[in-house]
Image (cartoon, grey):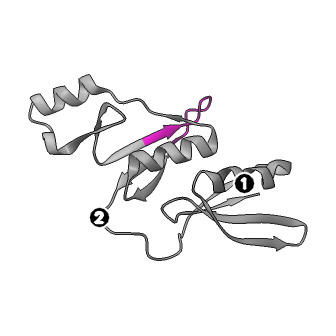
């Protein structure tokens, strides 16, 4: 049996981090369904304090997601109260090939930080951190 999945990333600012990752990967931020949110609040399934406004749209406070424009693969960014303290146990490896140095520069310009450069045999990569400190590798 095969299962589908999404990757979920803990975040202090899920909407802002979803924007960052959508830009970094060339994916799409899922649009807010304001009508659905309002209905859930009106029917008592959610509270007003479960929502917020982000870039002029009513959104769920606790999360934001991005989707691959073709495959539909999804990454969810969820609100957590505690800051990141230690190295990730899971991270994304992004295959950028010959464009690696250009992508390092682009992502650094978007707020990422270069952590270190690695090599194992003929394989090289750059380990970076997103604006909230979550690691990623450019291969």
Toward the viewer: 3 or 125? 125
Residue where numbered disc 2 is placed: 81
Foreground: disc 1 or disc 2: 1
- What element does badge 1 sit on? helix
Magenta residues?
65-75
Q: Is residue 46 left or right of residue 71?
A: left
- Please report the residue visible at 62 percent of the width from the left and 29 percent of the height from the top: 70
Relative to 70, does residue 88 appear above or below in the rendering? below
The residue positioned farthest toward the top in the image shown: 35
- Please report the residue visible at 52 percent of the width from the left and 66 percent of the height from the top: 133
Quarter-of-image position of residue 65: top left
Relative to 87, does residue 37 appear above or below in the rendering? above
The disc placed on residue 105 is 1
Q: Which quadrant: the C terminus?
A: bottom right
- Please report the residue visible at 28 percent of the width from the left and 40 percent of the height from the top: 60
Q: Position of residue 12 (x, y in %)?
A: 37, 59
Callout 1: 10 Å neighbours few (<14), some, many (20+)?
few
Q: Is residue 13 visible?
A: yes
Q: Is residue 1 visible?
A: no
Does label 1 or label 2 sit earlier along the sequence?
2
């Amino acid at each position: 049996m095969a299962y589908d999945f999404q990757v979920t990333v803990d975040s202090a600012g899920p909407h802002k981090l979803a924007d960052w990752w959508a830009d970094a990967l060339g994916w799409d931020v899922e649009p807010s369904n304001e009508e659905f949110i309002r209905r859930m609040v009106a029917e008592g399934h959610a509270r007003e304090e479960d929502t917020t406004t982000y870039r002029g749209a009513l959104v769920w406070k606790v999360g934001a997601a991005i989707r691959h424009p073709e495959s539909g693969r999804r990454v969810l960014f969820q609100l957590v109260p505690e800051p990141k303290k230690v190295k990730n146990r899971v991270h994304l490896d992004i295959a950028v090939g010959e464009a690696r140095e250009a992508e390092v520069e682009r992502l650094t310009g978007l707020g990422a930080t270069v952590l270190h450069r690695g090599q194992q045999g003929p394989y090289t990569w750059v380990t970076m951190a997103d604006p909230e400190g979550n690691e990623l590798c450019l291969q």
